[in-house]
Image (spheres, rainbow, N blue to C red):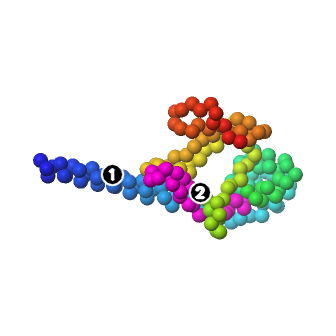
Amino acid sequence: MKTRFKKIILIAVSVIFIISAVLFLSEYGDYYFKEGEKLNIEEIISGGITKSEYIILKEQTGLSKSAVCDILSKDSGVEELLEFQKQNFSRFSVDCRYMFFPVTKKEVLKDKNGKTVSLKFPPLKTGDILVTKSTHTLLFRHGHAGLVTSADTAEVLETMSYKKDCPNCSHR
């Protein structure tokens, strides 16, 4: 009886270990950095932009056609688009920090000098949804979502916990 119980425990621990190892290996080091050639996009945006050029701009900046149009409608549009291109081709290190030791970590981007990096957002509109996957708990990657409730005042509504109403969860 004791031998059978020990076998069951050993099998259970082995299965848990294997599942944890697979989750760990599939999650860590899985960061995307832009590969390829950085093009001179000033030549593209100096004239009228064709449909195929919007595809090139998306590959170079990471921005959709509507975001590119919104940015180029500003006086500083060209410089801002070049900043998005630079950001898109940048490489960062990823630092995992405990939020709730020992089970929950969040990921923070660091530049080559070790300083925390905040990425620039394209112009947001009311109704836009922001989604992140920068947190992991017990080897399970998850994130947060927010709804832009007012682009003019930069208010974003998000919930603070799963399946909970939170009438005061608005950020500026």
What residue is drawn where x is 87% and y is 52%? 75
Q: Position of residue 70 (x, y in %)?
A: 79, 46
Look at the numbered disc 1 and give the secondary structure of its residue.
Answer: helix
Quadrant (top left/top right/bottom left/bottom right) for the C terminus: top right
Residue 96 located within the stretch drawn in magenta? yes
Q: Looking at the image, which residue sits at the far left?
A: 1
Q: Nearer the viewer, residue 95 or 86?
A: 95
Q: Residues within 10 Å of mark 2 (few under 14, many from 20)?
A: some
Q: Which residue is mark 2?
A: 108
Q: Quadrant of residue 60?
A: bottom right
Residue 76 visible? The answer is yes
Q: Residues within 10 Å of mark 1 (few under 14, many from 20)?
A: few
Residue drawn at point x = 61 percent, y = 44 percent: 131
Queried whether the magenta region covers residue 70, the answer comes back as no
Q: Residue at x 29, y 54 (%)?
A: 14
Q: Amino acid at mark 2?
A: Val
Disc 1 target residue: 16
What amino acid type is highlighted by mark number 1?
Ile
Whether residue 45 can be seen here: no
Q: CA distance from mark 2 to mark 1?
A: 28 Å
Find the magenta span and give its range: 85-108
Looking at the image, the residue that sits furthest to the right is 75
Q: Can you give x and y, in whole percent of width and height, for residue 167 in the image?
A: 62, 31
Q: Nearer the viewer, residue 22 or 102?
A: 102
At numbered mark 2, what does the secondary structure look like: helix, strand or loop? strand
Q: Is residue 35 left or right of residue 6?
A: right
Q: Quadrant of residue 124?
A: top right
Label pair 2/1, CB-CB below 8 angstroms:
no
In the visual, does 94 lie left or right of 154? left
